[in-house]
Amino acid sequence: MLFTRVTGSTNEWAKELARLGASEGTITISETQTHGYGRNMRKWVSPNGGLWFSLILRPELRPREAQKLAFVAGLAVAEVLYELYGLRTETKWPNDVLVNGRKICGILSEMCTYGDKTSFVIVGIGVNASFDPGVLPKLIRPVVTTLKNELGRSIQLEQLLKALLEKLETLYNLFIKKGFNPILREWKIHATFLRKMVEVSDQCKSMCGLAWDIDQEGALILKLHDGTLKRFIAGSVSTCKSEV
Ligand code: BTN
């Protein structure tokens, strides 16, 4: 485990190490990140008190399978937040964990592949842990929460990290041995957005419909008002603004 006080991004750091041959299980962790980022290269604000870390994995899986590791990480966070703090979390497609509708954790999995093989996967996890949401930019405050805010007290980052790493190991082994089904089944139990009207946006368009299911590939199936099913392999989900 490699720890520092400040780095640009633990994902970038982990990627550098992985390219140099770092083994599976190597972890980069930093107290703060100056250039933390999320999906679509969105800035991820990473103040002191958060848990910002990245894990190097080298699964012997095809890239199509390896990309499902983000679900493994989301489920690990959801289960640990319940087991340690009794928090009921929601998993939101594709890879967020929410409490009371606000984001408490973001997951960014990045892959390096060659042909049909996976060289390594970096699973980056950011938990808004022991800081006040007030330190975050005003614009994102309404959609974000922290463990400190939900619990009304500070938490021990070391305890959270240890529990998360143990859970990740357990669920990763389950995924490798038994495949995606048991992971997806549990993930869906937390997926309160399913069977609700949502708006799905990807790079090109946004569409409202009923969040119907998540399929075996981790894609979101949306049921449109005319009953047709539309499949999304990437994008983000929000509350539907227009009536359908
Ligand atoms: C998202 O919600 O878009 C994903 C956010 C992922 C943030 C974590 S914090 C640790 C790791 N380092 C990064 O730069 N990003 C991830």
Image (spheres, rainbow, N blue to C red):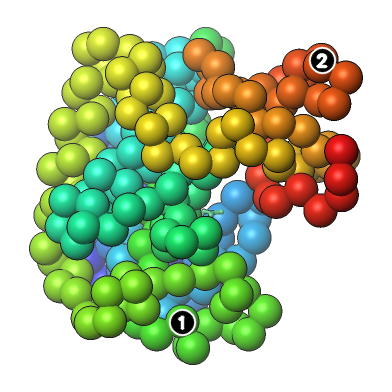
Q: Nearer the viewer, residue 216 or 52?
A: 216
**Residue at (82% x, 15% y) in the render:** 228
Separation of residues labelled 2 and 1 (CA atoms): 40 Å
Examine the image and state in which quarter residue 152 appears: bottom left
Examine the image and state in which quarter residue 203 appears: top right
State the count of labels: 2
Return the residue found at the far bottom: 134
**Residue 132 x/y as whole percent:** 39, 85
Element carrying mark 1: helix
**Residue 33 x/y as whole percent:** 43, 72
Q: Is residue 113 above or below residue 85?
A: above
Q: Within 10 Å of the Cα at label 2, are there few (<14), some (14-19), or many (20+) other Cα atoms? A: few
What's the amino acid at mark 2?
Answer: Thr
Q: Which badge, 2 or 1, comes first in the chain's sequence? A: 1
* Residue identified by numbered label 1: 133
Q: Nearer the viewer, residue 228 or 128?
A: 228
* Residue identified by numbered label 2: 228
Quadrant (top left/top right/bottom left/bottom right) for the N terminus? bottom left
**Residue 84 x/y as whole percent:** 15, 57
